[in-house]
Amino acid sequence: MKKIAFISILLIAGCTILDEKPASQLPAEDIVKDDNTLYLSTLGPLYALFGGTEFSQGLAGTYRGVYDLNTITSDEALLPTRSGDWYDGGLWQRLHLHTWDPGEAPLKETWNYLYKVIVMSNQAIEALNGKPEWRQEARAVRALYYYELLDLFGRVPIVTSTEVSMSSVAQSSRKQVFEFVVSELEDVADDLALSRSNYYGAYYGRITRPVAWFLLAKLWLNARIYAGVEDYGEVIRYCDLISGVGYELASDYASNFEVYNEKSPENIFVIPMDKRLYTAQNQYLFRSRHYDHAAACGFTGENGTPATLEVLYANNYRKSNQDPRFDINYWAGQATDLNGNPVKGVIYQPEAVELDVTGSDHEKLAGARMKKYELDPSAMKDGKLMDNDWVMFRYADVLLMKAEALIRSNDMASAVPLVNMVRERAGAKPMNGISQEGLLKERMIEFAWEGWRRQDQIRFGTFTREWSSRPELPDESQTGYTNLFPIPADILILNPLLTQNDGY
């Protein structure tokens, strides 16, 4: 059993805009100044919201939020319409086709969720004046959430005080938001604990110094997109700092996602999951499995998300050189139960996947399904409450970020060994050389289902261009603006000082 429990704080329904103050946050003057009560009143509620149970809540784990906006919009996954299943007013088709608009409910709900945690972070920061190390940690949480807003929406308001009214919040440029997040993380990093965040103990599931370093490496890796600047030396510097404090690749790729994965030497930052202590859910396995496959494992399924054809091409599916990670990440062909027995009638058809499979011979079985997280045989709530911690940041990403920075700095010779460390750990053959295109492909394989694909495609310039070769999609001139999501329409109504992102 996990030793440090996140306290699940019930938040007032509808607490979604900047002017509102969550009931779970006590006024600073009312907080009892012992450490336990102080933590439960400030940092505790923030960490409780990293995972979620409702639509668009949590950094990962639930539908229609940060994860889906980064995954269903990419060339990694889609939600096919299967007759009466998964049309949902055309939402999933619009996300995959890049034809969404500012009125989409998931955009508004995700925006509101991210700002809700920022509001709570500001309250925690103000309440923690007498506890400087925790105050810096609350600033790091706020920076993480601004990083998500920066990546998804670009031009957003920067709010650092509880005294600011929603109607008076000015909009910052994307470069200004980037500079703010970098400055905040650089300022607090040395005050954060130099501890592992994925292990049992006082810092389990919290933002520690290596987590901040990882975020800084990501920010500088994407700086050309975010701010029009480049400094790959900073990417390398932060990756080297992480490498210097004991992280390493797990000997078994799959072990990072097993039921009890808290002691992974590779996982840097996780959302703690415990079906008996926490309410945070992993809904993605539940959503992906065919009904009968799930039932044979003692769970429920929704017959939803499969991999795209692009995933099959990247993994050399059914070829002699198929990547060994494919069978770890995806159910393809015959499905089996928890004991390895074939599930009657459930033979997934990866190559039959389309955006709408209604009426096809493979309507219910088209597409390779999510397999990456080991099935927890004692999972609860139809399989959504499980003990596998959700992996947010991994050391494999540190190695591939550094490799990319080296490639972009024209140092191919130093990059290839880092890529091969990741490949050989999983049993894939080493490479003699690697291009930027090859590295993007490697990232698709290694980080399948981990929520990085949209960001990676944007950075490599394929988020819109590559799709133009597919006849069902608009050409690049129509979709280039979709690298950013629109500011939600209702938010523009609430605050007339905000203006819409270009193209919407």
Image: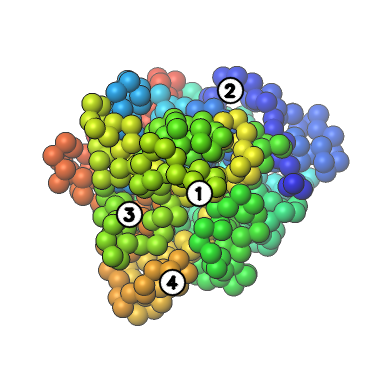
Labels 2 and 4: the sequence-earlier one: 2
Labels 3 and 1: the sequence-earlier one: 1
What kind of residue is marked 1?
A: Gly
Residue placed under numbered mark 2 in the picture: 15
Report crowding for label 4: few under 14, some 14 to 19, many 20 or more residues within 10 A (C-alpha). few
What kind of residue is marked 4?
A: Glu
Residue 313 location (% of width, % of height) = 26, 55
Residue at 40% across, 62% down: 324
Labels 2 and 1: the sequence-earlier one: 2
Identify the mark at residue 459; answer none if there is no mark. Answer: 3
For the image shown, how many numbered marks are present on the structure?
4
Report crowding for label 1: few under 14, some 14 to 19, many 20 or more residues within 10 A (C-alpha). few
Q: Marks 3 and 2, how far apart in space?
A: 34 Å
| Camera-nearest residue between 381 and 195 | 381
What kind of residue is marked 2?
A: Cys
Front of the two marks 2 and 4: 4
Q: Is 234 placed left or right of 76 in the picture?
A: right
Identify the mark at residue 340; answer none if there is no mark. Answer: 1
Residue placed under numbered mark 4 in the picture: 424
Residue at 79% across, 39% down: 38
